[in-house]
Image (tube, helix red, strand yellow):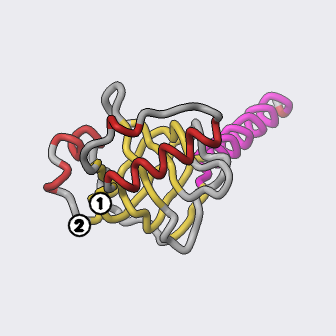
Amino acid sequence: MRRLIGLTVLIVVISIMGSAVASEKKKVGKDLSTEKPVEISKILEDPEEYVGKTLKITGVVIDMCVKRGGWMDIAGDKEFTKFTVDAKTADFKFPLDSKGKIATVEGILTKVTVSVEEQKARLSHEAEENGKEVDLTTIKEPKISYIIKAAGAEVDQ
């Protein structure tokens, strides 16, 4: 009987320790608010409604800057949707091992306009790096995108 009680206690302790490890998060930047995350699909429906507002989003990190941790793409709640989060101007970087993990990020939604000249310069640079050719005549107008300038983040470990 003692052996059974000891084994039961050991199983409970291991379960509790496993739960604590599973819920461990790497925190960077400012502490996140208690606000509920906004669904990425809702933001994408009308991003202008959210420009300049502090938002919290959560999802799986599907891509990121693996050299410096300056940005990450977070998968949306609907298929083929994602949102880019930028930490380049923040006083922190995202953990370099974040890809494939769940991240919750909070920051200000910002509208970014990339001029025709900037697009051409970027594409020329990428083509040169990759030894490819690119047709720059197809770029005829500025590109508008929306990003969240991160203030803080938590990434599951």
Residue in the image at 85% along x and 30% along y: 3
Residue 63 place in picture, x, y as percent? 54, 40
State the CA–CA distance, disc 1 to disc 2: 5 Å
Residue 141 place in picture, x, y as percent? 24, 46
SS state under label 2: loop
- Whether residue 20 appears in magenta in the rendering, the answer is yes
- Whether residue 155 appears in magenta in the rendering, the answer is no
Foreground residue among 23 and 155: 155
Q: Residue furthest top?
A: 79
Do the CB atoms of the residues marked 1 and 2 lie less than 8 Å apart?
Answer: yes
**Vertical arrangement, residue 19 with respect to residue 1, above or below:** below
Residue in the image at 51% along x and 41% along y: 61
Stretch of the chain drawn in magenta:
3-25
SS state under label 1: strand
What mark, if any, has residue 109 been given in the picture?
A: 1
Specify whether 151 is left or right of 46.
right
Residue in the image at 60% along x and 56% along y: 69
Q: Amino acid at mark 2?
A: Gly
Disc 2 designates what residue?
Answer: 52
Foreground residue among 112 and 37: 112
Q: Amino acid at mark 1?
A: Leu
Q: Main secondary structure of the magenta part?
A: helix
Q: Dot 1 surroundings within 10 Å: few (below 14), some, or many (20 or more)?
A: many
Residue 35 place in picture, x, y as percent? 30, 60
